[in-house]
Image (cartoon, rainbow, N blue to C red):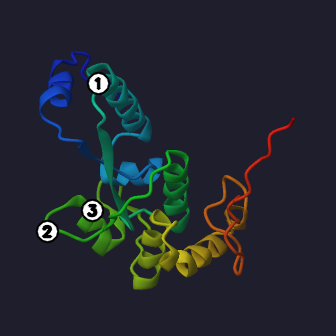
């Protein structure tokens, strides 16, 4: 996928039209889900994000990207939501808001939601219809929120991704009953 090589508009946007945050809509990172959404691959968002940071630095501006994300879009499974949660972990972003897919009249996504078929290919599309699975997908995108712990634990277990439950840096949550790591309150003594 190509993008505009002339950065005039991009530079003016950063210089004059952003007051601290720019909201963008990658919506997901799963290649399969993005295809159902009619969106470009996640690498397009990653290139945009990198260039945005570079241009903000050049302008001496401390501005942030706020990605708009969607859970339970037609085609999205628990595994896709986990992939998105891992991406969020890797970019150190915890969204305050996540949009659950909501069918809107006349859209391709709504057609897939109600029929379970991609009308472009006439192939079946997985659709999360149960409120519980939709809640698990949403919770995965906000896995750090303690109120989501039980749903995230269940989703990871159902998807056979217990490798993401533990104490390692790649884990999303700690095991059940694990206490938070103690903060080091002792000052190191200087060697004499």
Q: Which residue ends up furthest to the right in the rendered image?
A: 192
Of marks 2 and 1, which one's residue comes earlier in the chain? Answer: 1
In-front residue for pair 39/189: 189
Task: Name the secondary structure under disc 2.
Answer: loop
Give the quadrant of residue 60.
top left
Q: Residues within 10 Å of mark 2 (few under 14, many from 20)?
A: few
155 left or right, relative to 32: right
Task: Name the secondary structure under disc 1.
Answer: loop
Q: Residues within 10 Å of mark 1 (few under 14, many from 20)?
A: few
Residue 64 % position (x, y): 32, 41
Which residue is disc 1 drawn over? Answer: 60
Label 2, label 1: how far apart the Cα atoms are = 43 Å
Q: Is residue 42 positioned above or below 172 on the image?
A: above
Residue 176 % position (x, y): 69, 79
Q: Quadrant of the C terminus?
A: top right
Seen at 74% across and 57% down, the residue is: 186
Residue 77 % position (x, y): 49, 66
Label 3, label 1: how far apart the Cα atoms are = 40 Å
189 left or right, relative to 160: right
Seen at 37% across and 65% down, the residue is: 74
112 left or right, relative to 152: left
Q: Is residue 167 positioned above or below 148 on the image?
A: above
Task: Name the secondary structure under disc 3.
Answer: helix
Seen at 49% across and 52% down, the residue is: 88
Label 2, label 3: how far apart the Cα atoms are = 9 Å
Q: Quadrant of the N terminus?
A: top left
Of discs 3 and 1, which sits in the foreground?
1
Which residue is disc 2 drawn over? Answer: 105
Number of the label disc, if any, that sits on residue 109: 3
């Amino acid at each position: 996928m190509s993008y505009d090589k002339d950065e005039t508009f991009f530079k003016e946007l950063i210089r004059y039209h952003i007051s601290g945050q720019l909201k963008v809509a990658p919506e997901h990172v799963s290649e399969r889900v993005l295809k159902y959404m009619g969106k470009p691959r996640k690498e397009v968002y990653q290139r945009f994000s990198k260039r945005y940071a570079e241009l903000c630095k050049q302008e001496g501006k401390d501005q942030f990207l706020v990605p708009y994300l969607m859970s339970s879009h037609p085609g999205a499974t628990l595994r896709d939501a986990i992939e998105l949660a891992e991406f969020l972990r890797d970019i150190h972003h915890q969204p305050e808001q996540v949009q659950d897919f909501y069918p809107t009249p006349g859209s391709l996504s709504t057609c897939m939601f109600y029929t379970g078929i991609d009308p472009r290919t006439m192939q079946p599309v997985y659709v999360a219809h149960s409120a519980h699975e939709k809640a698990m997908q949403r919770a995965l995108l906000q896995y750090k929120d303690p109120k989501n712990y039980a749903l995230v634990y269940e989703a990871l277990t159902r998807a056979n991704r217990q490798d993401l439950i533990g104490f390692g840096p790649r884990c999303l949550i700690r095991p059940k009953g694990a206490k938070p790591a103690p903060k080091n309150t002792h000052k190191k003594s200087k060697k004499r």
